[in-house]
Image: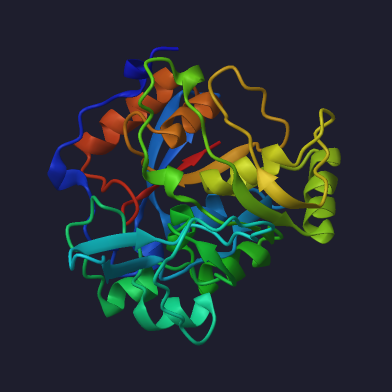
Amino acid sequence: MDVHDFEYELPPEAIAQAPALERDAARLLLIDRARGALEDHVVRELPELLRPGDCVVVNDSRVIPARVLALDASGHRVELLVEARLRIVAAEPEGPRIVERLDGTIDDLLASHGMLPLPPYIARHAQPTAEDRERYQTVYARSPGSVAAPTAGLHFTPSLLDRLRARSIEVHALTLHVGPATFRPIKSERVEDHILAAERVAIPASVADAVSSARNEGRRVVAVGTTTTRALESAAGADGRVRAHDGTAEAYITPGYRFRVVDALVTNFHLPRSSLLVLVCALAGRELILKAYQHALRAGYRFYSYGDATLIV
């Protein structure tokens, strides 16, 4: 597939620079695959747009203050992004070196010196505000480790979650720590030649069993976010059963992929030439997704991390 098939023109003013005043007041574009239809809603209407018995799965990873500014030996400013922890099993000396030892853990260091890693398309990404520190996290964020927010979940509120459960809609959480690849465009000319980095994931047995039960009973599995989708599809066997998993998610989902778990998806509007746009095209079809994006632009929807959402059913 030609990567240029996954491009669209986005005016800069359509990129959201701040979140909606209320999380669930963001707009929600319903994309109905069976009818090829589009409907305008708001996120707080989500419980009425889903069905009793649906199984909603969210990503509870928490964004860490992974962006660190420092000075190199010559006094020039350098920017570091702490992506993951590594366990060193062997090391070879490379000659003398100057080492500054710091007391405390890496978590202490980031808490003291790190900044929230806002996406580069947010103009103030170098100077996140107190509002960003609250709103660039989901209300259910529990497990620290992401360098970017699982943005579909930013729209959810405790009240919205309660209303979902009140309609007999299950809500379960897994953990996928979002890596920096979420910001990176596909640079290869062919989509298939792109290499998508693995991301750390943990799916508890209770969540795996709940998702598998929903599948067996003919109830829909609704993923909140492309990260949740990748986690579930990576952990599924050929029979569609999700297994408890503590390791990495490696699925690279492109058009032609047969979804084994996910039936519906809540997700934001994604960057051109991105693996995330390719994923939603795999689920709903490229023509319908690009049609939806053009509708959204004409209707004044806001795009990207702080922007509005879609519901693909």
Q: Quadrant of residue 124?
A: bottom left
Pinpoint residue 285: horizontal percent, then vertical percent.
48, 21
Pinpoint residue 115: horizontal percent, then vertical percent.
33, 72
Q: Which of the image's four quarters has the C terminus?
A: top right
The answer to whether residue 282 is above or below residue 78 is above
Left or right of 13 in this view: 91: right
Residue 141 seen in the current view: yes
Residue 32 seen in the current view: no
Pinpoint residue 310: horizontal percent, then vertical percent.
43, 43
Q: Residue drawn 45% across and 20% down?
A: 191
Residue farthest along the front direction in this orientation: 95
Q: Residue drawn 28% across and 68% down?
A: 69
Residue farthest along the bottom direction in this orientation: 103
The answer to whether residue 2 is above or below residue 6 is above
> What colouring does the structure picture have?
rainbow
- Front-most of residues 73 and 130: 73
The answer to whether residue 250 is above or below residue 149 is above
Pinpoint residue 298: horizontal percent, then vertical percent.
20, 35
Q: Which of the image's four quarters has the N terminus?
A: top left
Q: Residue drawn 59% across and 64% down?
A: 60
- Front-most of residues 106 and 125: 106
